[in-house]
């Protein structure tokens, strides 16, 4: 693409990619843009904005991937963004030059409802009919030429999952940007026209010229005052105008609540049905046979649990060799960096024990993250996740939620932030709030390193890989199992959420596109490494400094004198003989050096904080070093890995024979108190740590996004409630585990 002509930002054409959920919109977006993508939020809202660049010939167009929606009735933040973006009502987001509408060939008439609504906005359009291969398999024959004539715009058959028809689609889009074809608008009865005019007339004279047909349609049919208000009308004036229009609909014999739906579907059927030929002799399909198992209340649940077990067992077992490779690379980097900084001990410690050790201890878990997202993408792209949502609707109904909560909660297993944002598709505000508060209980990928470290160090060596995989699988359900009873109580006695109908389109089963799977793994892995390279990097330096300072010579001399005195008493030697031994014997000198390093850690700023707070966590079996890790991990829970790495590295616990963090932790013993000499990390302690991290709200970004989506009160409540619950649960697990 050396000869491509890149236009200026101001002159670049904008194409809005629009369609229903589960029509393959994201797959088409990836086909058109490749790696030329960026993700952010629309201004003023937390709805995610995906933008990419499509190269066609020597030109480039900006593709805006709008949220999937079934209609332009703005009942949720997602739908509001779609309508505002198409109308050009969003600040800093210009109106698109073309709408690329994607429809499912197997559900064409229903998908075109949104297209007909969009046609009223007066934006040029091209229709891409996706899943063309699935339609052929079902003997659904569509006359594309006749369909194009009926709609009045170019129609292109594609299969985005197989990248079929993409070149032809780009050519048609390039031509449409010049010819600007407009879709044939629906024909409305006189009562609708009278209703729109009545609404316009009821508006203030200053607002009437701004009230276009598109705005009038959306305002009257959806009872949405926001359009008129933004154009200068008061809320009362907007309400009066809408009421005037809807009264005209009543007088014309139409129900305002469903008039648009009835009238549009009637015209769609009349115009589109002649273009589609169905094979009515077929009695069923393979998909229906599979669905009879996967959506069954018993077999479907067993299949879901079985799939999840395979996923987490694979996450644990497959990543081992890659983790060893990264660990070896970390050691090599530490050796190389350390050799360059031998003349500056403090800088050497910062680089090797702080930055490389801290960030490397987190990056080592990148293979697990990649494998987890590989499976999540695989299950989403095959169409299984929609079946799982249908299945979960039955399980969630007992506590007042519906299957609509499943997708946000499932997204939270990757990260709670997109999970919280995904709740905007839930119309009921109470159900949305409870789903938002429930989302952080799902075991996100940031908890995965904690589980893998504890399970790999203490459970696998004792019980084997099978039990280790099962433990990892079980830990991912702790948050859900603990939180659901609270949801039931909150719904029954406080929120009292009414029963919610759950309507879901079952997408066709598809073979996942390798490119899409790899791209998802790449973007999520990049995000994880980016966090390790920025947020965790910054926190790591702060933690290193708090653990390194203060560092006085008096403390080192005091430890040295105590060591010499104790060694002389134990070995029956004079202090002079011990001093001579330290100079001659490297092993004895190294042991003294580790004692001094350990004393420095205990007397450091963070060590003092840990010892002060440790009595609170002593009930859960945590020593002061674990407590320091817990405190440091509140900005981001995975920081505990780097914190423990720095603590044991600075504390002299890491040597050539036990350089791995797991080995170091396994050798830790209580230095004082009634448990002196006993291992710190017993199975009850390890279990308490994992349960604490499974339930605790240790993510500042999640608290911020909850506050942004709801209010700061819910953000504070989430933090306080989850942290308190995590402490109580960790104490119970440790105390009961110790008894057993």
Image (cartoon, rainbow, N blue to C red):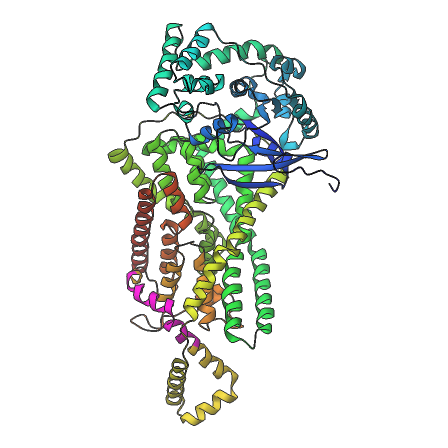
Left of 606 or right of it: where is 529? right
Image quadrant occupied by the C terminus: bottom left
267 or 618, nearer to the observer: 267
Residue 274: x and y, percent? 60, 10
Q: Is residue 269 above or below residue 549?
A: above
- Could one spot residue 317 in this view of the protein? no
Q: Name the residue located 49 percent from the left edge and 80 percent from the top edge.
A: 590
Q: Residue furthest front?
A: 206
Q: Residue furthest left?
A: 493
Q: Which residues are magenta?
A: 597-616
Residue 305: x and y, percent? 45, 40
Image quadrant occupied by the N terminus: top right
Q: Name the residue located 28 percent from the left edge and 33 percent from the top edge.
A: 495
Residue 702: x and y, percent? 41, 46
Residue 214: x and y, percent? 49, 19
144 or 588, nearer to the observer: 144
């Amino acid at each position: 693409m050396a000869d491509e002509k890149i236009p200026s930002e101001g002159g670049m054409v904008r194409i809005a990619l629009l369609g229903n959920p589960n029509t393959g919109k994201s797959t088409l977006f990836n086909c058109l843009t490749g790696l030329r993508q960026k993700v952010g939020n629309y201004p003023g809202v937390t709805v995610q904005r995906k933008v990419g660049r499509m190269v066609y010939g020597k030109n480039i167009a900006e593709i805006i991937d709008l949220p999937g929606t079934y209609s332009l009735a703005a009942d949720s933040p997602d739908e509001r963004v779609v309508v505002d973006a198409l109308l050009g009502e969003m600040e800093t987001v210009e109106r698109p030059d073309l709408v690329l509408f994607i429809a499912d060939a197997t559900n064409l008439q229903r998908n075109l409802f949104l297209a007909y609504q969009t046609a009223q906005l007066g934006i040029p359009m091209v229709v891409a009919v996706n899943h063309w291969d699935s339609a052929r398999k079902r003997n659904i024959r569509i006359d594309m030429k006749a369909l194009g004539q009926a709609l009045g715009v170019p129609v292109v058959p594609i299969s985005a999952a197989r990248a079929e028809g993409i070149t032809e689609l780009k050519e048609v889009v390039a031509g449409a940007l010049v010819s600007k074809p407009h879709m044939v608008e629906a024909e409305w009865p006189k009562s609708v026209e009278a209703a729109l005019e009545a609404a316009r007339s009821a508006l203030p004279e200053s607002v009437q010229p701004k009230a276009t047909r598109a705005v009038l349609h959306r305002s009257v049919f959806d009872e949405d005052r926001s359009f008129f208000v933004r154009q200068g009308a008061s809320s009362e004036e907007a309400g009066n105008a809408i009421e005037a229009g809807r009264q005209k609909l009543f007088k014309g014999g139409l129900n305002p609540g469903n008039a648009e739906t009835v009238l549009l579907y009637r015209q769609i059927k009349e115009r589109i049905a002649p273009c589609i030929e169905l094979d009515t002799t077929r009695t069923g399909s393979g998909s229906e046979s599979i669905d009879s198992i996967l959506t069954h209340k018993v077999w479907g649940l067993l299949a879901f649990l079985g799939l999840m077990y395979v996923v987490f067992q694979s996450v644990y077992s497959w990543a081992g060799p890659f983790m060893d490779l990264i660990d070896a690379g970390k050691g090599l980097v530490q050796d190389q960096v350390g050799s360059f900084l031998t003349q500056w001990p403090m800088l050497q410690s910062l680089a090797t024990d702080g930055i490389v050790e801290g960030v490397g201890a987190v990056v080592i878990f990148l293979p697990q993250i990649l494998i987890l997202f590989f499976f999540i993408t695989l299950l989403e792209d095959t169409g299984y996740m929609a079946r799982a949502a249908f299945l979960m609707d039955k399980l969630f109904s007992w506590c007042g939620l519906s299957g609509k909560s499943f997708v946000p909660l499932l997204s939270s297993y990757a990260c709670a932030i997109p999970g919280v944002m995904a709740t905007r598709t839930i119309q009921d505000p109470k159900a949305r709030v409870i789903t938002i508060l429930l989302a952080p209980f799902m075991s996100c990928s940031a908890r995965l390193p904690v589980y893998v470290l504890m399970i790999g160090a203490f459970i696998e060596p004792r019980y084997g890989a099978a039990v280790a995989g099962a433990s990892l699988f079980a830990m991912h359900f702790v948050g859900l199992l603990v939180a659901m009873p609270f949801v039931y109580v909150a719904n029954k006695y406080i929120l009292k959420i009414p029963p919610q109908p759950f309507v879901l389109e079952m997408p066709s089963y598809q073979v996942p596109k390798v490119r899409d799977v790899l791209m998802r793994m790449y973007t999520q892995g990049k995000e994880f490494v980016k966090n390790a390279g920025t947020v965790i990097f910054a926190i790591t330096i702060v933690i290193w400094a708090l653990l390194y300072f203060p560092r006085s010579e008096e403390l080192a001399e005091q430890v040295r004198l105590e060591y010499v005195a104790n060694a002389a008493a134990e070995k029956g030697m004079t202090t002079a003989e011990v001093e001579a031994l330290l100079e001659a014997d490297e092993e004895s000198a190294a042991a003294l050096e580790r004692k001094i390093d350990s004393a420095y850690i205990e007397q450091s700023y963070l060590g003092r904080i840990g010892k002060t707070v440790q009595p609170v966590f002593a009930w859960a079996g945590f020593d002061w070093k674990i407590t320091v890790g817990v405190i440091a991990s509140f900005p981001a829970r995975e920081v505990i890995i780097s914190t423990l790495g720095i603590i044991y590295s600075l504390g002299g616990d890491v040597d050539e024979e036990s350089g791995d963090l797991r080995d170091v932790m396994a050798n830790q013993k209580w230095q004082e108190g009634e448990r002196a000499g006993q291992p710190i990390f017993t199975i009850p302690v390890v279990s308490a740590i994992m349960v604490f991290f499974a339930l605790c709200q240790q993510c500042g970004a999640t608290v911020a996004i909850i506050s942004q989506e709801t209010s700061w009160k819910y953000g504070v409540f989430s933090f306080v409630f989850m942290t308190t619950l995590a402490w109580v649960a960790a104490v119970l697990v440790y105390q009961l585990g110790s008894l057993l």
